[in-house]
Image (spheres, rainbow, N blue to C red):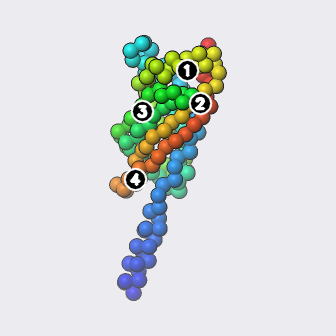
């Protein structure tokens, strides 16, 4: 009887440990330029995602490349753990050191208030209870920036 109970418990535990679903990208909010010069430019934004999983999850070691109209803008790195509730939206505050060459290629469209395509590509480690796996991230969104 004990053996059957152990097997049933083991099957239940392994069945509940399936791979996390990818987060759903929702939007970019609060886009702002923190520092602007020809050598170093920093932009900040809040990336809003939704956790479709039926359980809370932890994110750590986020490594994202950000593109505007397929031109590389910069890299976002996060080396801290963020706790995310099940079936909920969460905000990933982001500050990116910008590659000015990529910005100059898109400057006219952005300044004129035209829509641009923002792409976010990379990896994160996601998991719970100390078990983490690599989860790819690839999102695209059309975004209009109003500076004036």
Number of residues whose C-alpha sits closer than 10 Å to that of mark 2, classed few (under 14), some (14–19) or many (20 or more): some
Q: Judge by depth and name the residue closer to the eye, 18 or 30.
A: 18
Is 41 placed above or below 12 here?
Answer: above
Number of residues whose C-alpha sits closer than 10 Å to that of mark 1, classed few (under 14), some (14–19) or many (20 or more): some
Q: Quadrant of residue 110?
A: top right
Q: CA distance from mark 1 to mark 2?
A: 10 Å
- Residue placed under numbered mark 4 in the picture: 133
For the residues bearing labels 4 and 2, Cβ distance under 8 angstroms:
no
Mark number, residue 76: 3
Secondary element at image label 3: strand
For the residues bearing labels 1 and 3, Cβ distance under 8 angstroms:
no
Q: CA distance from mark 3 to mark 4?
A: 19 Å
- Residue placed under numbered mark 2 in the picture: 117
Q: CA distance from mark 1 to mark 3?
A: 19 Å
Secondary element at image label 1: helix
Secondary element at image label 4: strand
Pick the quarter of the image with the C terminus: top right
Image x and y of residue 63, in percent: 41, 38
Residue 19: tell me if it is visible: yes
Q: CA distance from mark 4 to mark 1?
A: 35 Å
First reached walking from the N terminus: tag 4 or tag 2:
2
- Residue placed under numbered mark 1 in the picture: 106
For the residues bearing labels 1 and 2, Cβ distance under 8 angstroms:
no
Point 59% across, 16% down: residue: 108
Of tags 1 and 3, which is closer to the observer?
1
Image x and y of residue 23, in percent: 52, 46
């Amino acid at each position: 009887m004990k053996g059957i109970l152990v097997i049933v418990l083991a099957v239940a535990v392994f069945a509940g440990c399936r791979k996390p679903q990818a987060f759903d990208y929702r939007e970019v909010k609060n886009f702002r330029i923190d520092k602007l010069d020809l050598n170093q430019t920093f932009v900040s934004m809040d990336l809003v995602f939704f956790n479709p999983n039926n359980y809370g999850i932890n994110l750590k070691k986020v490594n994202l490349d950000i593109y505007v109209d397929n031109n590389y803008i910069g890299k976002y790195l996060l080396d801290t753990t963020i706790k995310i509730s099940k079936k909920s939206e969460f905000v990933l505050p982001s500050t990116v050191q910008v590659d000015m060459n990529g910005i100059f290629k898109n400057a006219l469209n952005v300044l004129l208030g035209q829509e641009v395509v923002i792409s976010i590509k990379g990896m994160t480690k996601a998991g719970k209870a100390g078990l983490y796996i690599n989860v790819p991230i690839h999102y695209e969104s059309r975004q209009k920036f109003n500076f004036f």
